[in-house]
Image (cartoon, rainbow, N blue to C red):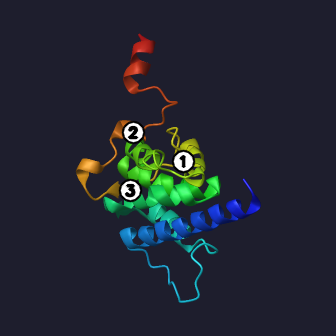
Amino acid sequence: MDGEGRAGQEQERRRLYALALADVVRALGLRVGLGPRYDLLKDHRVLVKVFEGCREGMVLPAEALDALARAAVYERDPSYNRYYLDAAMNAFGVRRVREAVHALLPTGTEVERAGVERADYWLGGLHRRYPGVTAADPALAASPDELRDPALPRREEREERAE
């Protein structure tokens, strides 16, 4: 692909990322002080607010799942996309978040497919635990099994080994 094509793809990724971040702000009711000259993509205020919300505890509405999944896909840096995924996984569970992220694959652009691959790194089940992060709708809430570290055996498995 030529340089002009890559530049166009990057411009489109930035546009979609800005839309996803605006949806995160709206869905989570974040106060980020956006002014007319504010560049949502240069400043990580939204990311910081999501992280602070995770530490302090927050209740996520259903529409936050898609918004956080898209923000994670369009965020280029895997160190940063993790914050969106951690919030979503704690509230909705790994399976639902994986489904939301992978929903972009069938019709996704090259940029979106790459973003899904970056997000998949964190969707392996290991994520930061934030017990105060929950889903507003109990039907969408993560089950205890989804929040369990897959590397640790379940209590029943430990008891069987002990016998």
Counting from the top left corner in percent of width and height, residue 3 is at 75, 61
Counting from the top left corner in percent of width and height, residue 51 is at 52, 63
* Residue 12: quarter of image: bottom right
Counting from the top left corner in percent of width and height, residue 100 is at 41, 49
Mark seen at residue 146: 2
Query: In the rendered view, does 41 fall on the left or right side of 23?
Result: right
Question: In the rendered structure, which disc, 2 or 1, sits on the residue that comes first in sequence?
Answer: 1
Compared to 27, does 142 lie above or below? above
Label 3 with label 1: CB-CB less than 8 Å: no
Query: In the rendered view, does 109 fall on the left or right side of 87?
Result: right
Query: In the rendered view, does 145 fall on the left or right side of 69?
Result: left
Residue that numbered label 3 is attached to: 65
Residue that numbered label 1 is attached to: 116
Task: Judge the density around disc 1: few (<14), some (14-19), many (≥20) Cα neighbours within 10 Å.
Answer: many
Does residue 83 show up? no
Quick one: quadrant of the C terminus? Answer: top left
| Amino acid on which disc 1 is placed | Val
| 123, 49: nearer the viewer | 123
- The residue furthest top is 163
| Secondary structure under the numbered disc 3 in the rendered image | helix
| Amino acid on which disc 2 is placed | Glu
| Amino acid on which disc 3 is placed | Leu
Label 3 with label 2: CB-CB less than 8 Å: no
- Distance from Cα at disc 3 to Cα at disc 2: 16 Å
Q: Nearer the viewer, mark 2 or mark 1?
A: 1
Q: Residue at x 37, y 36 (%)?
A: 145
| Secondary structure under the numbered disc 2 in the rendered image | helix
Q: Residue at x 34, y 55 (%)?
A: 134
